[in-house]
Amino acid sequence: MVFRTGRNMDSLLARVVPRLWWHWPLSLLLWGGIATLVAHFVDIMIYGEPDQTILLSFPETVLTAAPLVIFALLLVRHANQLRHEAMFMASHDPLTGLLNRRAFLAELGNQQGGALYMLDLDHFKQVNDTYGHLVGDDVLCVVAAAMTTAVRSGDIVGRLGGEEFAIFAPGLHGDAAHALGERLVQGAQHVEPFSNSVIRVTISVGGYWTDRGVDTTTLLRKADHALYEAKAAGRARIVWYVSESAFAARPPSAVA
């Protein structure tokens, strides 16, 4: 509902707020004409008949209204920019710029078939303990950028909290889904600027593939179960959920 309301507002503002230079004179003529018509009808309501000279004063009305019209349009455009920024901050993680948990789950709930990946950075606590939380934040940003590069343009990437991320790839299955998981496992590396140390971070990935819509709670639980198995098996790998007691190195659709 939030996103739908935002789109409706964007559609309205696109018709009202000038975007190109030649929109501005048209807007002045439009709003000047509206002001003239309003004055015309007010004159009729007060005196019972229109002032015959009012239509001749259209250029003067436009020039008089121009500063107010420009100010109002600039104010509306600025308010629209602030609204977009507020919507972005409400739906995105402030550190990495990825979708936050709430927004990711909202997007996930609208999906049908595809591959869900739960990701956890391996030994990330050691990075924080060794280099500090500021460097840890830099590593999170580098990893988030690597994830964004690894996925397709239509895939959904979010940070669920801490060093835990999630990705949903609509319509992806079989070997293609497994190939993406293998790329994600590689993680990323970050060069710490003060000591020039290379920090290499791998990722444990739990995958779940479905060919139909499933509630988000079930999706996350199954992918998270597979993630637990990947970490228990030694980390830096992807494990796919098959059933509550069965897991595989490849997605079920690609298992022989």
Image (cartoon, rainbow, N blue to C red):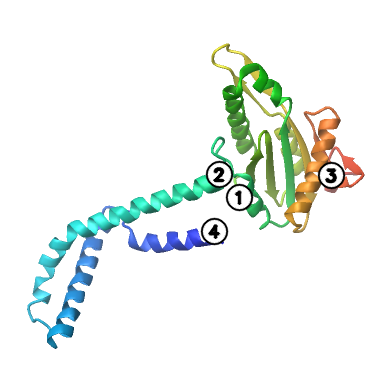
Indicate which label's residue lies in the foreground, 4 or 3. Answer: 4
Name which of mark 3 and mark 2 comes first in the sequence.
2
| Mark sitting on residue 92 | 2
Name which of mark 2 and mark 4 comes first in the sequence.
4
Q: Residue at x 70, y 24 (%)?
A: 125
Q: Secondary structure at mark 2?
A: loop
Q: Position of residue 93 (x, y in %)?
A: 57, 40
Q: List the single residue furthest toward the right.
A: 245
On the picture, is 56 further left or further right than 12?
left
Q: CA distance from mark 3 to mark 1?
A: 24 Å
Residue bearing the label numbered 3: 241
Q: Residue at x 57, y 24 (%)?
A: 134
Residue 113, above or below 46: above
**Can residue 174 be seen here?**
no
Q: CA distance from mark 2 to mark 4?
A: 14 Å
Q: Residue at x 17, y 62 (%)?
A: 65
On the picture, is 181 further left or further right than 39?
right
Q: Residues within 10 Å of mark 4 (few under 14, many from 20)?
A: few
Residue bearing the label numbered 1: 103
Q: List the single residue furthest toward the bottom.
A: 48
On the picture, is 211 further left or further right than 163?
right
Residue bearing the label numbered 4: 2
Question: The disc labelled 1 sits on which kind of residue?
Answer: Ala
